[in-house]
Amino acid sequence: MNALIHRTVRRVQGVMFKLPGMITCEVFEDFILAYLEDELPAPQRRVFEMHLKVCRSCRRYLSDYRKTLAATKARADVDQATLENVPEDLIAAVLAARISEDR
């Protein structure tokens, strides 16, 4: 029974992707950042969200993308906080050492 349900879902998704205005997974990927930053015009947003409803792999991709952005932001915040606590003379010494190594 599961195989029948799986085949039916795949057929429905195949039909959905052929509807006028539906986007492909490749096009979906091009608009993820604009979607997350709420920069898509309403008609494009509706098409994007329609694709999300019918495409499990793009829902996973979007979820992973969000997690990656959050982790990157958290890392940047930690790096900035760390840099603020480093004495300037230490930074100057490290930079001077790198310059002398490059020569």
Image: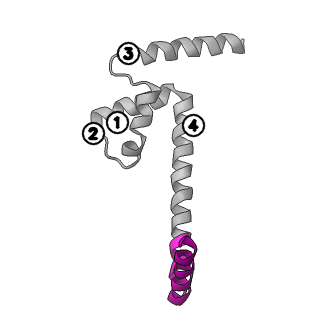
State the residue position of label 1.
45
**In the shown orientation, is residue 5 left or right of residue 84?**
right
Disc 2 from disc 4: Cα separation: 23 Å
Point 54% across, 37% down: residue: 61
**In the shown orientation, is residue 44 left or right of residue 12?**
left
Disc 4 from disc 3: Cα separation: 22 Å
Quarter holding residue 50? top left
Give the numbered dot on residue 15: none
Q: Can you see residue 86? A: no
Mark 2 residue crowding within 10 angstroms, few (<14) / some (14–19) / many (20+): few
- Give, as a three-letter code, the residue at label 1: Arg
Residue 70 pos. (x, y %): 53, 56
Q: What element does badge 2 sit on?
A: loop
Disc 2 from disc 1: Cα separation: 6 Å
Residue 83 pos. (x, y %): 52, 78
State the residue position of label 2.
41
State the residue position of label 4.
60
State the residue position of label 3.
19
- Give, as a three-letter code, the residue at label 2: Pro
**Residues in magenta?**
79-103
Label whose residue precedes the other's in the sequence (2 or 4): 2
Q: From the image, which quarter does the N terminus lie in? A: top right
Q: What element does badge 3 sit on?
A: loop
Furthest-right residue in this view: 1
- Give, as a three-letter code, the residue at label 3: Leu
Magenta portion: prevailing SS class? helix
